[in-house]
Amino acid sequence: MPVSDRPQRILTVSALTALVRERLEKDFSDLWVEGEVSNLRAPASGHLYFTLKDATSQIRTVLFRAGALRLRFALKEGLQLVVRGRLTVYEPRGEYQIVCEYLEPKGLGALQLAFEQLKERLAGEGLFDPSRKRPLPFLPRRVGIVTSLTGAALHDILTVLRRRCPILGVVVAPVPVQGDEAAAQIAAAVRALGASRLVDVMIVGRGGGSLEDLWCFNEEAVVRAIAESKVPVVSAVGHEIDVTLSDFAADYRAPTPSAAAEAVAPVLSDLVGSLEDDRERMVRAVRGRLLERAAQRTDETTARLRSTVQTMLAALHRRVSERRHDLQVVSPVERVRAASVLLPQLTKRVMQGIVALLTTRRQAARTAMAALDSLSPLAVLGRGYSIVQTVPGGAVVKRARDVSPGDEILARLADGRLLCDVRKILPDS
């Protein structure tokens, strides 16, 4: 029978898609795929949708809500994942996709990545800021312990506390320190014990273990409870090499539970010895103070006696001074000295009188000289006049008729003389 004569089976799109889905789910029911996260979406349903891609290809991937709630770390764009799941087809769009059942970061464990992501976020909120750390009390009344009743950590802590300070009170809040329910119970115990006002300081921790065993002390609820505790908290999780986020949030991080007990409990015998030393020093100080007071009273008495003697001596000095003054008043020497004091004054007065008389006489002389000068012929010459005299003879010419034309006359000026010839005699105009 020719191929063209065979009856053809015509499929709908839905039927074809269902066939493809069945075949894919049968042949690829359990596979591992490696790729980079992109196009990440997290709708309100709680499912996570993203694309896994490499250099040349990509495939849609979904992690349903139940699996997303179990994730220890947060998915981010660009994160390299190793995914385990099954291949199926999303029939409404005819697209094949991977339904994840397990995933982990490539090259870094999921818990380690979760640790780093939560550490970065809480540090950004300031929960690990050193300024938030409180000092541990010097001598607490009671110590709270949040740990398991069956673990070795509780035994180690109690042993150290009893050895160092037997009188120290202890309140134990038993909690599981491993498993899914541990974090919530540890956080609740820390908050309850801190708010109870029964303890002055708190130790939170357990013995050593793997990262998975210690993980409850990395849970956000526990870290926040420790950071918000109303009393100082000592973190004592695992061994010295173990580090949890609770260590960063606590006020003090102890490398072991035993070291935590040593941090909160002083050695009682050392305190008693220190008190004895303080008592001895106080006794010596009191004795010294009593001696100081006696010495002070002696000094005060000596000072009063010295003051009395000085007062009496001062009175005697005053009396002697008064008698000396009386003698000086009636002494002839003092009279002569008093009279001699007047001599400079009298001399000064005489000198002042002579100066005044000389001044008066000088002024009178100046006045007479001025009068004589005003009457002097020389003074007249100085005002522009001249004295005319005959030559020879030197008689003063007072009238024009006293000379004749052709006579010589001598004109005397204020400065120098002129020899002149009379040319003509003119009448008064």
Image (cartoon, helix red, strand yellow):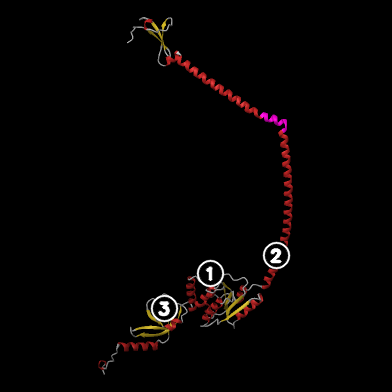
Q: Are marks 3 and 1 in contact (CB under 8 Å)?
A: no
| Residue 52 visible here | no
Q: Which mark is residue 282?
A: 2
For disc 3, the neighbor class at 10 Å (few under 14, some 14 to 19, many from 20) is many
Cβ–Cβ under 8 Å for marks 2 and 1: no
Label 2: element kind: helix
Residue in the image at 73% along x and 37% along y:
324
**In the image, is residue 80 part of the stretch drawn in magenta?**
no
Residue shown at the point (72%, 47%) measured from the top left: 311
Give the mark, 3 or 1, whose residue is nearer the N terminus.
3
Q: Of circles 2 and 1, which is in front?
A: 2
Q: Position of residue 72 (x, y in %)?
A: 47, 79
Count the numbered circles shown.
Answer: 3
What span is in magenta? 330-340
Residue nearer the viewer, 178 or 107? 178
> In terms of depth relative to the viewer, which is nearer, 326 or 101?
326
In the rendered structure, find residue 132 and report the number of the disc placed on it.
1
Q: Is residue 373 above or below residue 320?
A: above
Which amino acid lies under the numbered mark 2 shown in the image of this protein?
Met
The residue positioned farthest toward the left in the image shown? 5
| Residue picked out by circle 3 | 35
Residue drawn 72% across and 32% down?
331
**Distance in Å between CA atoms under marks 2 and 3:** 76 Å
Distance from Cα at disc 2 to Cα at disc 1: 38 Å
Q: Nearer the viewer, mark 2 or mark 3?
A: 2
Residue 27 in sight: yes
